Amino acid sequence: MIPDKKRGRVLITGAAGFLGSHLCDRFINEGFEVVGMDNLITGDLKNIEHLFKLKEFEFYHHDVSKFVYVSGAINHILHFASPASPIDYLKIPIQTLKVGSLGTHNLLGFAKEKNARIMVASTSEVYGDPLVHPQNEEYWGNVNPVGPRGVYDEAKRFQEAMTMAYHTYHKLDTRIVRIFNTYGPRMRLNDGRALPAFIGQALRGEDLTVFGDGSQTRSFCYVDDLIEGIYRLQFASYYLPVNIGNPQEVSIKEFAEEIIALTGTKHKIVYHPLPKDDPKQRRPDISKAKAILNWEPQVSRKEGLKKTLDYFKTLTEEELYKTEHRFS
């Protein structure tokens, strides 16, 4: 059951990030007091600056890999602190491992102390380069622990194991959400993923870079849909992992063509070698989310891309030209 307003106080880690900032908005709009926490390695205060004027919001500039403490009651914790793109976790691999391991351990202990329900943000990356398609929650994955994505994949797999251990041994009230590719306003244009990279290239008048032959697939979920699914899961009576994502699958080549059409550019697609361990297919089985949460995506890709493009058009020229190498 989704709670009534004025229900309690929520700690959201990674609050200045893409998803964390949207979660802060949602919980405040639902009548909660929100404590945001972020070390700002990949987060941006610009994403939450509109919240600082609100009495319902407070912010802690803190790294959750170190001891975590917030005074007063905390009823819910949503652990969304982590680098979340290959650009990030290839640049800061140790921090990526630490936030998924030490950070998760700290927050589980803090949840135990506060008697709070805690959700950890896992990822479709726990499935690796999947041999099962679409991916359901019972699939154990095909992950290379020593490959370039291993620091993120294994941090998230450890995070799930640690969360289940606290649930089983300490009877902690836990939730695990496995998030698939998500897009929307507040994405970082230079975060290395396909969607912002394509839009950025189109807005700069550049050719669009596709890795491999473009036949690899992704399934893109608009951020509002994802946040709705996460919110419902936090208040559902289910502790095992749940996939939240959009099962509508598209090849990277087709997706690049959609961006070209949307932006009205005349530029072509250029092809580069596929990065090591880049997943060939990614599509969630959302049967559990439908059955348990009565949830499925509502925003079409056409509608979501239009909203996302409108957001990127508001970026400054400096932000638009701050780019890095891309993965999908």
Image (cartoon, helix red, strand yellow):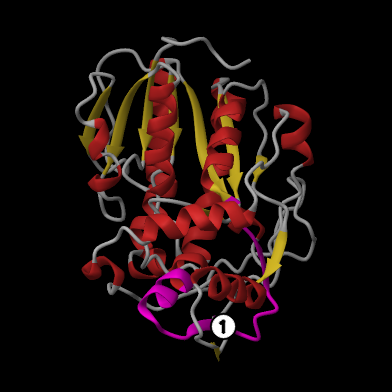
Q: Nearer the viewer, residue 161 or 244?
A: 244
Q: Which residues are magenta?
A: 198-221
Q: Could one spot residue 161 in this view of the protein? A: no
The amino acid type of the residue labelled 1 equals: Phe
Q: Nearer the viewer, residue 65 or 37?
A: 37
Q: Is residue 311 above or below residue 4?
A: below
Question: Horizontal and vertical percent for residue 254?
Answer: 66, 74
Q: Is residue 151 above or below residue 215?
A: above
Q: Is residue 323 above or below residue 53?
A: below
What element does badge 1 sit on? strand
Q: Is residue 74 left or right of residue 143?
A: left
Question: Horizontal and vertical percent for residue 76?
Answer: 44, 22
From the image, which quarter does the N terminus lie in?
top right
Q: Residue furthest front?
A: 264
Answer with the quarter of the image where residue 89 lies: bottom left
Residue plotted at (78% across, 66% down): 131
Q: Is residue 6 left or right of residue 230?
A: left
Q: Is residue 8 magenta?
A: no
Question: Mark 1 packing: few (<14 Cα in 10 Å), some, or many (20+)?
Answer: many
Question: Horizontal and vertical percent for residue 153?
Answer: 54, 59
Q: Is residue 5 left or right of residue 95?
A: right
From the image, which quarter does the C terminus lie in?
bottom right
Answer with the quarter of the image where residue 234 lies: top right
Q: Could one spot residue 269 in this view of the protein? A: yes
Residue plotted at (21% across, 31% down): 52
- What residue is pinned by disc 1? 211
Residue plotted at (24% across, 18% down): 71
Question: Horizontal and vertical percent for residue 133?
Answer: 79, 60
Q: Is residue 217 magenta?
A: yes
Q: Nearer the viewer, residue 216 or 70?
A: 216
